[in-house]
Every structure is written in C-alpha cells, then in structure tokens.
Image: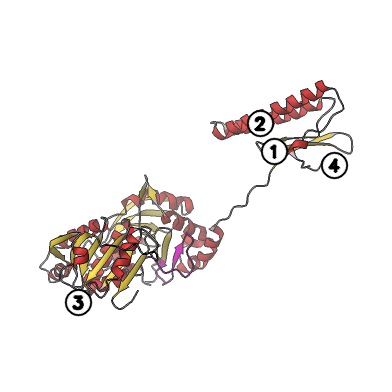
C-alpha cells in the first residue's frame, strides 16, 4: 500500500468532491452518504443505551462495510465521506494496483491522569519493610487505602479500623479481655481485600475493629479489646515491636486522608486530595484540647482521664459533621455563650467518675454511658463547653459573630473566630473541627 492510502483529513464542507457524472448519480451518492451517517448515529445511540451493546457495535461494523461495498458499485465513487457524529472517517484511495482500500479510524483518545502510579511508588518502601506477605505487592495496600478513604455501605459512611497481622491469635491474646469473631476467608489479593471489607466494615462499631490475617488464605473477621473505659488504648499495645508478631493498621482519620501505621514504627498520612505534602494530620490538635480540659485536674487523674476523653472524642469526631469545643477556666460558662445555649444543671464530672472507677467504687457502665452522651452532643449544632477541671458544662451554645471580611468560611468558622477573640477573657481554649475532619485550635498560651 503506497502513501496514497494514508488517511486524509479535509474540511467537512469539502468531504464530498465534485463529480463529472450525471445529477442522478450525484443524488444517489448523497442520499447513500446521508443514510449511512444517520444509520451510524442510530447504532451509536443503541450501543450506549441498548441492552446489547456488543451486538450493536458489531452491527455498526457490518453495516459500514456494506455501505462501503455499495458505494464501489457507483460509477463515480467518493474519495472520502465523514460521519461526524462518531468522529469516524471512512477513507478510500486507489492502491498502486488500482484496487481500493478502505480504512476506519477513530479520533485520538484523551490521556488519563491518575495518582495511582505515584501512590504505589510512595508506599513501596513501607510495604517492603512491614514484613507482611500480603503487601509484597504494594498495589494491595493501595487498594485498601483507596477503599477506606470514603467507605460507604448502603449510602452510610463507615470508618472501620483495619488491623493486618500474621498471627491474629497472638494479637488478641495481648489485649485484656480480648474477643475475636471469625467471619470467613478469601484470596490474599485486592479482590479478597474488597470482599473482606464488604462483610466486616458494617460490624466495626462500638469498639469492634476489622482484622485481616496474612497467610495462604486471607482470614478476616472482627475483634475488640476490653470494654473497661479506662483500659489502655489498643494501639499502645498492638503497634509496638513484638517479634515475630507484625501488625499494620490502616484507618481513615478524615475525608480523603488515611493513616497507615506499622508496628515497626513506620507510618504515613496518605492524602487523596489537593493538600500539600507538608500538611499536618487532621486531628493534630486533639491532644491539645484534652490537655486544656484536664489542665487543673490532679496529677493522679490526668493520665487516665485524658486517655478516656481522647478515645471518646476521637471516635465521636470521626462520626460527626464537625464541632466546636470551648474550654473555660470559670465554674460556669461565660455569659457570651451561656445566655444562648443548653447549660446542664448538674455538670457531667468526668474527673469524678474516673476517680471513683479507679478506686473501685464506681461502675464502668456509668462512665461509658456518660461518654455516649458526649458523643451525642458533638453531633448537635452549636458549641460544647468544658471547664479545665474535666467537667462538661453545656452544649448547643451559640456566640454572636461579626461579619468580618477577613474570615473566609461559613457559620462554624465565624463562630470559632469569635471564640478565639475571647481567649484569656473567659475562655482558656477553643477547638474547631470542620465537616471534612480537619481541626484548628487556639489556647491561652498561643499553642496553636
């Protein structure tokens, strides 16, 4: 085939050349081209919306070939006609031997841009050092990260904490009063990971977590630690280097942000959006908030109370739509937020409840139930008010805001700006979590 057979591109208005034949021949030719273009358009619509796309596409190819053959029978055959509805060009040019050659070509396809390759490369070193066979292929970890970033079942957002280990029995044995429920087993690949999440993620609530046991088969299920509200946090027990046990935790800590942590000390925050590489983690100010709430508690209670509040607040904030927490150094909420809100007649004294439980005089259920009330308050509108002695004073409180042009954002951000202005004048700290999970903090010592 010589260069004359190459595909030619001509303007649409020149697609049908002039002919020397009779008008009847030209009319028949134009009619044939119009019918062909219309039939191609019908096949395109049917291939996209009909139940038998393959059959339609096959019919399109066969019909196009028939049309080309019919045009050959005409005395004056077209050199080129264009079907603009499909961006297809059917070209014909005589070959060196005088025969004809027909060619159907599609317009250039767009080039997709994806972060997949970069993400695989970024976690490769983590996968090689974690010591789990499941992550020998870094793509398996990538599939898990992407799945957890915005995991939903039946339209409901879920935030399961996933632990991957090479020995789940040893892992649960490390937890006081640990429990485990095996759900099933599958293949140790990306498809198996998706299957295991589908069956276990809805179960991972109220302290239950998902486990995946690495082996020839990928065993999956759920487990939990002690139900005692003062028990040591699971991560402080599991994410430590205990040879030969290997543990990796993958967990979504905010929208489009997944934390990947290994028992060997390696960890990453994977951002799946436009944020910069040096962006701090979403809940970086949670520790500062807890320290402000427990600032004036006794030394022997501060650690236990702080651990309890951190667990409750962490869980509640992952399930809420955003919140604002104010901490005051006064016995009652200051008037600028206390006059418009729900102030508890008897504040919930978490420090007192923790002290009773430590001495064996309290019921763990009482402290757990009060923690559930705190979760519910975080899901309501307005500001939650603590004092710096570990007492919950009120919720659903509001503050008057100024429409400052320098504040960019909605009502929550404007309210937080108003609270920041009151630090040192009735408030000792202010904390805000946005709807997507990211936080801001302002303290009396400007430790923001």
Earlier in the chain: of badge 4 and badge 1, it is 4
User: In the visual, does 422 lie left or right of 196?
Assistant: left
User: In the figure, residue 160 lies in which quadrant?
Assistant: bottom left
Q: Are marks 2 and 1 in contact (CB under 8 Å)?
A: yes
Q: How far apart are marks 2 and 1 (CA)?
A: 10 Å
Under circle 3, the secondary element is loop
Under circle 1, the secondary element is strand
Q: Distance between the residues labelled 2 and 4?
A: 26 Å
Q: Distance between the residues labelled 4 and 1?
A: 19 Å
**Residue 277 colored in magenta in the image:** yes
| Residue placed under numbered mark 4 in the picture | 4
Q: Distance between the residues labelled 3 and 1?
A: 76 Å
| Residue placed under numbered mark 1 in the picture | 88
User: In the visual, does 239 lie left or right of 95?
Assistant: left
Estimate how packed mark 3 is, as few (under 14), some (14 to 19) or many (20 or more) residues with alpha carbons within 10 Å: some
Looking at the image, which is closer to me, 42 or 10?
10
Looking at the image, which is closer to me, 104 or 401?
401
Is 183 located above or below residue 343 in the figure?
above
Q: Do the residues labelled 2 and 4 touch (CB within 8 Å)?
A: no
Earlier in the chain: of badge 2 and badge 4, it is 4
In the picture as drawn, the residue positioned furthest to the left comes out as 361
Under circle 4, the secondary element is helix
| Residue placed under numbered mark 2 in the picture | 40
User: In the figure, residue 402 lies in which quadrant?
Assistant: bottom left
Earlier in the chain: of badge 2 and badge 3, it is 2
Q: What stretch is highlighted in magenta?
A: 261-283
């Amino acid at each position: 085939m010589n260069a004359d057979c190459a595909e030619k591109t001509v303007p649409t208005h020149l697609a049908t050349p002039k002919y020397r034949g009779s008008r009847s021949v030209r009319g028949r030719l134009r009619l044939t081209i119009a019918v062909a273009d219309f039939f191609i358009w019908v096949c395109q619509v049917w291939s996209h919306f009909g139940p038998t796309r393959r059959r339609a596409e096959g019919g399109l190819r066969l019909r196009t070939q028939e049309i080309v053959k019919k045009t050959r029978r005409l005395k004056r055959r077209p050199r080129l006609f264009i079907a603009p509805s499909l961006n297809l060009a059917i070209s014909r040019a005589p070959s060196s031997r005088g025969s004809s050659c027909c060619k159907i070509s599609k317009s250039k396809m767009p080039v997709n841009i994806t972060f997949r390759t970069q993400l695989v490369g970024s976690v490769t070193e983590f996968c090689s050092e974690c010591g789990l066979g499941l992550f020998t292929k870094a793509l398996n970890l990538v599939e898990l990260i992407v799945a957890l970033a915005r995991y939903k079942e039946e339209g409901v957002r879920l935030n399961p904490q996933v632990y991957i280990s090479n020995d789940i029995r040893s892992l649960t044995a490390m937890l006081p009063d640990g429990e485990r429920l095996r759900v099933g087993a599958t293949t140790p690949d990306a498809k198996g990971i998706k299957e295991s999440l589908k069956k276990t993620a809805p179960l991972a609530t109220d302290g239950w977590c998902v486990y995946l046991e690495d082996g020839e088969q990928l065993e999956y299920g759920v487990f939990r630690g002690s139900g005692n509200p003062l028990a040591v946090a699971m991560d402080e027990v599991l994410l430590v280097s205990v040879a030969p046990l290997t543990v990796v935790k993958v967990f979504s800590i905010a929208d489009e942000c997944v934390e990947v942590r290994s028992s060997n000390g390696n960890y990453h925050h994977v951002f799946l959006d436009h944020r910069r590489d040096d962006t701090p983690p979403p809940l970086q100010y949670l520790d500062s908030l807890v320290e402000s709430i427990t600032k004036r508690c006794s030394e022997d209670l501060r650690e236990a109370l702080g651990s309890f509040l951190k667990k409750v607040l962490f869980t509640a904030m992952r399930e809420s739509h955003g919140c604002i927490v104010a901490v005051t150094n006064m016995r009652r909420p200051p008037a600028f937020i206390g006059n418009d809100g729900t102030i508890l007649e008897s504040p919930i004294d978490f420090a007192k409840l923790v002290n009773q439980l430590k001495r064996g005089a309290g019921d763990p259920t009482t402290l757990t139930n009060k923690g559930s009330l705190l979760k519910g308050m975080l899901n309501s509108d307005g500001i939650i008010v603590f004092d710096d002695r570990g007492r919950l004073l009120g919720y659903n409180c509001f503050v008057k805001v100024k429409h400052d042009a320098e504040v960019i954002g909605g009502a929550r951000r404007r309210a937080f700006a108003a609270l920041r202005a009151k630090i040192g004048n009735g408030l000792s700290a202010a904390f805000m979590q946005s709807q997507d999970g990211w936080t801001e903090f302002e303290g009396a010592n400007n430790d923001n």
